[in-house]
């Protein structure tokens, strides 16, 4: 029996050593496949509703972008106007969100955004830039004076009544609380 146990132990140790040597190589191979896809970005370019451009950058497979990448914007507008290259900075709105700010004048622009290696990508979109609009003025609010004679007059009678009740209760307690000593 001891001979069979020794053989089984040796086979188990050999199998464990083989698996531990193969596991790192398999893990590297598994990471290499997504890394090849991660070399590309998906850039979604759109206007911001005024005179700027917004860009949402994600990995090609749809994963959220966790690192900062350098995006460069160039644009060609009406009458051959050119803007750029402008380096875009990430915005606090979320991972992979970039904004140019007001760099375009009113009109239709062809916008290109490039990302250099290692996450190489390029996207082009047509953006309609409009003059920034201010929100409408708020409607005037009518201010009316209270009918009861002013603010704060309603609670004084209740406070006075409460003080009278407390004083009466203390007087009754003093009258009936005395001890007679004979």
Image (cartoon, helix red, strand yellow):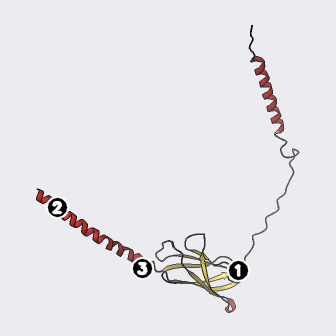
The percent position of residue 84, horizontal first and vertical second, equals 63, 86
Circle 2 Cα neighbour tier, 10 Å, few/some/many (<14 / 14–19 / ≥20): few
In the displayed structure, 121 sits above or below 136; it is below
In the displayed structure, 139 sits above or below 57; it is above
Circle 1 Cα neighbour tier, 10 Å, few/some/many (<14 / 14–19 / ≥20): some
Cα separation between marks 1 and 3: 40 Å
Q: Give the residue at mark 1.
A: 130
Whether residue 143 sits left or right of residue 113 in the image: it is right
Whether residue 182 sits left or right of residue 60 in the image: it is right
- Total marks drawn? 3
Work out which quarter of the rendered image holds the C terminus and state it. Answer: top right
Circle 1: element type:
loop
Circle 3 Cα neighbour tier, 10 Å, few/some/many (<14 / 14–19 / ≥20): few
| Nearer-N-terminus badge (2/3) | 2
| Nearer-N-terminus badge (2/1) | 2
The percent position of residue 138, horizontal first and vertical second, equals 79, 65
Q: Residue furthest front?
A: 181
Q: Residue at x 28, y 71 (%)?
A: 21
Q: Nearer the viewer, residue 150 or 167?
A: 167
Q: Image quarter for residue 27?
A: bottom left
Circle 3: element type:
helix
Q: Residue at x 82, y 32 (%)?
A: 161
In the displayed structure, 146 sits above or below 135; it is above
Q: Give the residue at mark 2.
A: 8
Q: Give the residue at mark 3.
A: 36
């Amino acid at each position: 029996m001891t001979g069979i146990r020794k053989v089984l132990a040796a086979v188990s140790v050999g199998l464990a050593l083989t698996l531990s040597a193969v596991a790192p190589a398999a893990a590297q191979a598994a990471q290499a496949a997504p890394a090849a896809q991660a070399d590309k970005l998906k850039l979604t370019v759109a206007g911001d509703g005024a005179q700027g451009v917004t860009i949402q950058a994600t990995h090609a497979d749809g994963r959220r972008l966790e690192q900062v990448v350098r995006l460069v914007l160039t644009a060609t507008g009406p009458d051959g106007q050119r803007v750029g290259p402008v380096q875009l900075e990430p915005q606090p709105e979320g991972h992979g969100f970039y904004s140019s700010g007001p760099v375009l004048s009113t009109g239709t622009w062809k916008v290109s955004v490039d990302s250099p290696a290692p996450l190489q990508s390029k996207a082009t979109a047509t953006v309609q830039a409009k003059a920034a609009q201010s929100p409408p003025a708020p409607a005037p609010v009518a201010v009316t004076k209270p009918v009861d004679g002013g603010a704060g007059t309603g609670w004084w009678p209740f406070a006075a009544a409460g003080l009278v009740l407390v004083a009466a209760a203390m007087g009754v307690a003093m009258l009936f609380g005395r001890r007679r000593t004979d």
